[in-house]
Image (tube, grey):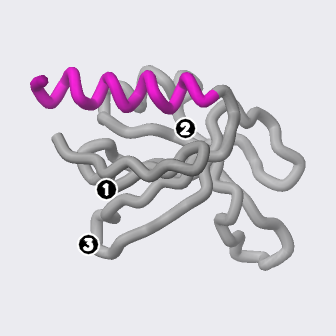
Amino acid sequence: MNTTEFLEEWRKFFFSTKGKIVGVTFQKADGSIRTMSARMGVYNPKNAPAPQGIVDRVEQDSIANTLTVYDMNADKKDNVHKGGYRRFRFDRLLSVRYQGKTYKVSA
């Protein structure tokens, strides 16, 4: 399986979760490891503004090999609200936890 097919399979996986919580561990651009509890399909949550920028996130994510998700535990600067939209790169994905199983990711 080539890298493009690999990334597309993971993209399909995330969209197939239909809003269920998925644990994601990935390497950030600065080299640190980040783990988040992410959900797809969150629109207009009460405590987080919609993502800024280009309206068509799916197209933008596809071009950049990223995925925009709603991180249930993201800290906000005002310390009042939790949760917010975050993005990760598929080529830095390390593992995924879903429905009690952990999947190690390797291209």
At x 65% / y 65%, what residue is drawn?
A: 74
Residues tagged 2 and 3 counted as in contact (Cβ below 8 A): no
User: Dot 3, how many residues are within 10 Å of its Cα: few (below 14), some (14-19), or many (20+)?
Assistant: few
In the image, residue 72 lies at what x, y percent? 70, 57
Q: Which label number is shown at residue 94?
A: 1
User: What residue span does the magenta drawing correspond to?
Assistant: 1-17
Q: Nearer the viewer, mark 3 or mark 1?
A: 1
Could you tell me residue 84's position as x and y percent? 68, 55
> Where is mark 3, residue-wise?
31
**Residue 75 in which image quadrant:** bottom right
Tell me the CA gap for discs 2 and 3: 25 Å
Magenta stretch: includes residue 54 = no
Identify the mark nearer the N-term, 2 or 1.
2
Front-most of residues 70 and 13: 13
Q: Is residue 71 above or below residue 58?
A: below
| Residue 21 point in image, percent of width and height | 66, 45
Q: Give, as a three-letter code, the residue at label 3.
A: Gly
Q: Which residue is mark 2?
A: 53
Query: SS class of the residue under badge 3?
Result: loop
Which of pointers 3 and 1 lies earlier in the amino acid sequence?
Answer: 3
| 24 to 35, vertically: above or below | above
Residue type highlighted by circle 1: Leu
Query: Is 15 in front, or is 30?
Result: 15
Residue name at image x 36 percent, y 71 percent: 33
From the image, give the main secondary structure of the stretch colored magenta: helix
Q: Secondary structure at mark 2?
A: loop
Left or right: 20, with 6 as reference point: right
For the C terminus, give its image quadrant: top left
